[in-house]
Image: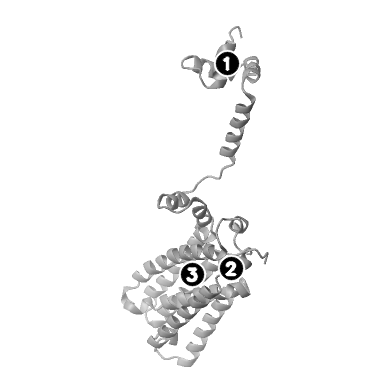
Amino acid sequence: MSWHVPEEDLRAYARGELAAPALWSADAHLGACARCRAVLGEVGDPVALDAGWERLDAELDAPRVGVLESLLVRVGVAGHTARLLAAAPVLRRSWLGAVVAVLLLSVGAGHLVRGGESLTLFLALTPLLPLAGVALAYGPALDPTYEMAVVAPMHGFRLLMIRTVAVLGVVLGLNGLATLALPAYGLRALAWLLPALALTATGLALTPRLGPVLAPSLAGGAWVGLLLLADGLRAGSEVPLAPFTAAGQGVAAAVAALAAGLLFVLRDRFDLFQGRAV
């Protein structure tokens, strides 16, 4: 190679002052000429060079921003909060796909099987979905981003509430769409809403003492046991199960209110719970 970039041009190149078209020639030549690259390393500012490498490393190591995170930031959510929400397991495709599959199966049963039993299946399964979502959204046992959540600049209770709202917004929205697909049952198809809120609030209120796995598991188990007991008491008649009657809905609303109050009282315990490796 007979031509090389003049040293003055290399100095200007290192300072970012070399103008086109000399800049284009220097770029093309430096990619193929080890001698000019060596001279560039000698005439360049080592401090600026190190700073450039640090910026490059930071850019390469920065996590790629997903669609959901970008959307949350656009609507005003803080960057670190958007990252924690987008990384939650309940907002990933596998979890959402499982929820949609359960709802499709229960709605399909409602259309294929005539009578109250198909609606009962829908009403029994639907309240468990937000409860399971909240269980996946918090705690070291199930959350793969737990370490990031621990060092996040927010209290444990606030993080829990942010992710709970995200879970409820997604799951209750999907449940609502599934309910619209059962128009033949009218308002009876909405009897899942208050039990869902009661189960979720109860599981959250028990979390500081029992942990993010055992607490919702007990709440879900109690719900299944209650349905089995109510089914046994009605002795095969066509009347709705007790939790889906007017009285049962009132009890669910009262349980949801009491559990929400208890959760507010115990809010400071989530900061202690957040640091436990359980």
Residue 98 shows in the view = no
Residue at 47%, 52% in the rendered image: 78
| Residue highlighted by disc 1 | 10
Identify the residue at the far right of this view: 277
Crowd around label 2: few <14 · some 14–19 · many ≥20 (10 Å): many
Label 1, secondary structure: give it: helix
Q: Which quadrant, please, contains the C terminus? A: bottom right
| Residue highlighted by disc 3 | 130
**Which mark lies nearer to you, 2 or 3?**
2
Mark-to-mark CA distance, 2 and 3: 20 Å
Vertical placement of residue 49 versus 263, above or below: above
- Name the foreground residue: 118 vs 28: 28
Query: Of marks 2 and 3, which one's residue comes earlier in the chain?
Result: 3
| Residue highlighted by disc 2 | 270
Mark 2 residue type: Phe
Q: Picture coordinates of residue 222 (x, y %)? A: 55, 81
Q: Are marks 1 and 2 in contact (CB under 8 Å)?
A: no
Vertical placement of residue 128 versus 232, above or below: above
